Amino acid sequence: MKNFHPDYQKHRRLCHHRSSNYTSNMSCALVLLLINAIMIHHAVTCFQHSSSSPKATFGLQKRGSVVAAQQLFSKKEDTEEEEEDWRDFRAKLLMQFKQAEKSESSSAAASQIVEDEEEYSDFDRPIGDPTLTAAATTTTTEDEMTASSSTSTKSSSSTSSKSSLNQGWAYDSGKIIEKGSIILSRAAQGFGFGLRQQYFHKCVILVTFHEENTFTKGIILNRPTDLILTDDDFVKDDGITPLDDCNEENAWRMWFGGDVAGMAGHGGQHGSADVDPETICLHSLTSDAADEVSEKVIKDIKWTTLNGARKLLKSGEAKASDFWVFCGYAGWGPGQLMGELERESWYMAATDSNTLLKSLAKQDSELSDPRNAGLDIWQTLMDMIDHGDDYKRLKNTPQAEFDDLMLREWARANLCFQKSSGDDDDKVDDSEKEEKDDSGKAGDFMDDLIKRASSAAKNVDKVEVGTLVRASSSKDYPFLLNDQEFHKSIVLVIQDNEMMSVGVILNLPMTSSGNKIPGKIPCRYGGAYGIKGQVGKPSFWLHLNKSLRDAKIGSPVGDINKEDGIWSCTSEQVETALRAGIAKPTDFMVVSGFSVWGKVGRGEAGGIRGEIWDGDFEIVSKDCVRPVWDTLTTQEELTPENMNKNLDIAETAWMASSSSLEDDDEEEEEEDDKRMVYNSDVSVKSLADDALKCWVGALLLDNPRLRKST
């Protein structure tokens, strides 16, 4: 070996290192499979040996051998010994394996030093070679080092694993789904949770129920709110009758548990007034009374209903601070969660109860701000299952930063109920905060509400077919967290009846659709709905041209546009006008798809009028229509290269539509622009603009990572 060049030795050691890492990863996966195989085999063996015993009260359940193994590894006997979490057994085996693997690595490294020492003579050792220092301070032979390592492993592996278990443990459990498992969202997805369902970004979910062929249910553990409720705030199942024996001293801090049956209007698509909220209370009480009203999740963690918790309070067995109250849950149908695991949306993990209880207690402290959204809890568990470094490397990437910021804004909007967690803490200039009088906050809010309602009432009756509306500038970015396509949008109302309002977005050009559109006129995204059989095809042709109106090309969009407004026409009429030379391509817009605002159950409070009432849209005055139209017709067919240019033109048109706004509204918009995302140096205005870019990249260009900054 002395005849080989030293670079070869370095290359050989590098290859050995890479091979060891690959072997290590493969070994961990095989060990998990082996551990489960051992447990299943042990379960079957114990069942066979104990089938004739009168004390044998268990058997292999239809739900699978893993469930049977869970029962077998429960050590609670008639002697009332402390129950041992069966997951501890699996964790202990895994940790012992890792400890042995680590020792083998150390032995291999030591062996390599000795081998390298033999390969170099006193004359050919490179100056400054690190093995020189190691060899000079080491007189132990390879055999002695191996023997020493082996002895150390035998004497310390058991102690080390026990110490690790006492400090808390967690590991990646592959695709094992069971009650008590932890689900950790993966933050490096292509699409991610930045644009929708932000509450799932970097979330920690505890599985409270799992039946493979029916349903999986879990609660998000790292989304506490600042909402404190008393017994008087709850009602019975009928939704009206107050609870019996209410005690105003019972204070319950609420946690967002998921998007199903959650807080009405807070959190998710399933959290609405039409669905009764569902609450469960986690606790670690050990009394018999607590066991009677509770169901075990894992060792030392159980759940009960709110009524069960109140019963324990009334009997003196507990106090309100013993419970974590979750409203809502996350749910998956048969095979759904497994499918998402295979698409790498989640990690499945196992951890001990002490780790979870510590994380809950940390978030429950008075210093915990809901706007933090439990990001540190997620990172801690990711580190514990050896996936934390992957995401630390992505921390400063545009995608990771965007998703974190969107989660914080979601938390501010949905987890903060107290004014102290509101806008004022997020302003740029601290001196401006000090000038604000706290006693005037409620009054300012009411004045603002009255002003918006008055403005909406004054203009809402003007909405009819043919009206142009714009996304609001007087409200705090209503399309930041959902429906980002409407951010700074211009919408033409094309239908309004007792069932719904229909409109088309005019400011979002799409990529080439393959349709033969004359004159390279860009086809525009009008909305998420399409005409049956015409998906992706041009749906509406529009023009704002006097010569075309005089030539009766098309018909007015609503009565308000008969004389000088926007008209609709057909593709055949467009081709005829272009051939006749009475129009040019930039005189037309073509739109595919449309947007719908329903009125069912809301009446006149629904539809586009309801959107204006809510402050999400504003009416564009008649004198702004022409400059808005002329600006938008300069947009081009969308490509990754011109995305920023097209969006800049869209913003220019949106600004041009605001000349009818009152001075107070303009001042309010400037004030909103100063607010920063919590614990960041990014303004909410910038984030809202970035969310639109992300939407365009993901939905119109099929590139969710496309950013202006790139």
Image: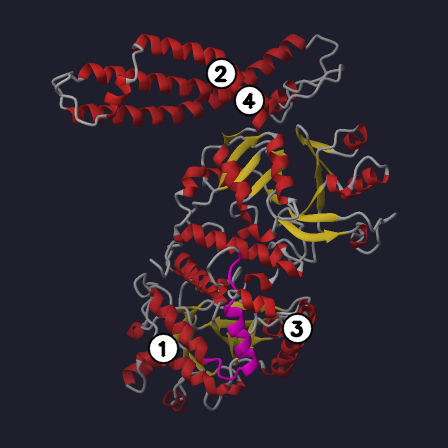
Does residue 4 lie above or below 228 as drawn? above
Q: CA distance from mark 1 to mark 2?
A: 72 Å
- Residue 169 left/right relative to 708: right
Do we see residue 545 in this rendering? yes
- Asked if disc 1 and disc 4 are in contact, CB closer than 8 Å, the reply is no
Q: Residues within 10 Å of mark 2 (few under 14, many from 20)?
A: some
Outermost residue, right side? 245
Q: Which residues are magenta?
A: 657-678
Q: In the rendering, at what x and y percent does residue 134 appear?
A: 28, 20
Disc with the residue nearer the chain's start (1 vs 3) = 3
Q: In the rendering, at what x and y percent does residue 97 appear?
A: 46, 19
Q: CA distance from mark 1 to mark 3?
A: 41 Å
Q: How many marks?
A: 4
- Asked if disc 1 and disc 3 are in contact, CB closer than 8 Å, the reply is no
**Label 3 element class:** helix
| Of 512 and 140, the residue lying toward us | 140
Disc with the residue nearer the chain's start (3 vs 4) = 4
1 or 4: mark nearer the eye: 4
Disc with the residue nearer the chain's start (1 vs 2) = 2
Q: CA distance from mark 3 to mark 4?
A: 57 Å
Q: How is the image coloured?
A: secondary structure
Q: In the figure, residue 71 lies in which quadrant?
A: top right
The residue labelled by disc 3 is 444
Q: Residues within 10 Å of mark 3 (few under 14, many from 20)?
A: few
| Of 205 and 141, the residue lying toward us | 141
- Asked if disc 1 and disc 2 are in contact, CB closer than 8 Å, the reply is no
Q: In the figure, residue 45 lies in which quadrant?
A: top right
Labelled disc at residue 157: 2
Labelled disc at residue 163: 4
